[in-house]
Amino acid sequence: MHDDQVDVTTGTVANLIGDQFPQWSGREIRPLRSSGTVNAVFRIGNDLSARFPLRRADAAEVLAALEREARAGAELAQVSPFPVPEPVALGGPGAGYPMPWSVQTWLPGTVASDADPSRSHTFAADLASFIAALRNADTQGRHFSGGGRGGVLTHHDAWMEKCFQESERLLDVDRLRAMWSQLRELPRTSPDVMSHRDLIPGNVLVAGDRLGGVLDTGGFGPADPALDLVSAWHLLRRGPREVLRRELESDDLEWERGKAWAFEQAMGLVWYYAESNPTVSTMGRRTLDRIRESME
């Protein structure tokens, strides 16, 4: 999926486990088929999963990032009303793999990209409960920092221009430019709250028609209260989407800013993964279609 991607095999994982965590040697190692774009994931026995960053980077920087993710994941686990993976250990480079990697608890369930919960009002209410619990967590005086989603919409103009250029043969770019010109101007009026920051289908587990758990919790941190509302557009159809909005008591401005963050994310997914990860690219298209329909 990436020009700088590192391939990870079951044999590599077995060697790393044997060298660094011999207490888990002999457990069955199974690669997880996933539409994920950041990590290769392997199941270790029945209760653990190992995550290996896919994009080659400096080992010290990766370790620092994994340590931050572990702290964030542990903090989120303390406030989440739904199951989330908890950090267990950090591994180091070896056996041909050049970077640190992480081990977490394994959660049962089916990711929402495989078990579509978009029609379920119950799932939407569960999702609202999860977002509300995160919003109620203490920011401990922290504020959004960095260049990702969750800060200032207009700071993403250069990225959006690249997305529009790359999407010329894929999407109706003229219409999408007009939509972004409207969305980017939405003002920010509320202070930061704690946020998952990436509530996409691949990070959400479904059990029946309920929310079964939430994955990829390492980004938990302060952000625009509207950021987790991307889930309304990535995961839900119109009726359940309104359930989510009603349960969270989102006003018009917050709701529209959530739409703006979903739009920004979806635009990048369509072209970047058009050939390398069609599932994610298609998800981006679906989100854009839902947003477009809401603005017509």
Image (cartoon, rainbow, N blue to C red):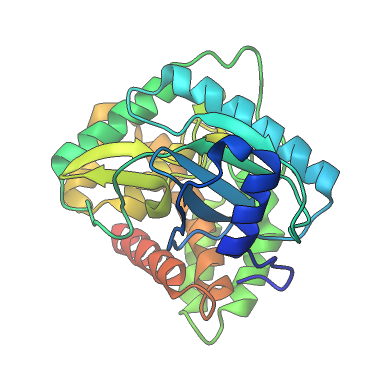
Q: Is residue 77 visible?
A: yes
Q: Where in the figure is residue 217, as x and y percent of width and height? A: 51, 36
Q: Could you say which is closer to the camera, residue 133 or residue 151?
A: 133
Viewer-side residue, 87 vs 183: 87
At which x and y percent is residue 159? 67, 61
Given residues 87 and 195, the one toward you in this image is 87
**Residue 165 sits above or below residue 69 on the image:** below
User: In the image as oriented, which residue stretches furthest toward the front?
Assistant: 26
Quadrant of residue 2 within the rendered picture: bottom right
Residue 160 or residue 231, whichever sits in front: 231
Q: How many marks?
A: 0
Q: Is residue 204 left or right of residue 78?
A: left
- Tell me the quarter of the image containing the N terminus: bottom right
Q: Which quadrant would the C terminus be assigned to in this image?
A: bottom left
Relative to 28, say whether 225 is above or below: above
Q: Is residue 142 above or below residue 203?
A: above
* Residue beneath the point at 35% across and 30% down: 83
Q: Position of residue 251 (x, y in %)?
A: 35, 32
Name the residue: 34% across, 37% down: 213
Say which residue appears at 29% left-offset and 63% top-offset: 293
Question: Where is residue 285 shown, x and y percent of the image?
Answer: 40, 70
Which of the 4 image quarters holds residue 22?
A: top right
Hey, which residue is sitting farthest bottom in the picture? 169
Q: Residue at x 45, y 66 (%)?
A: 280
Q: Is residue 275 left or right of residue 116?
A: right
Residue 3 sits in quarter: bottom right
- Would residue 256 be visible to someone looking at this image? no
Q: Is residue 8 left or right of residue 236?
A: right
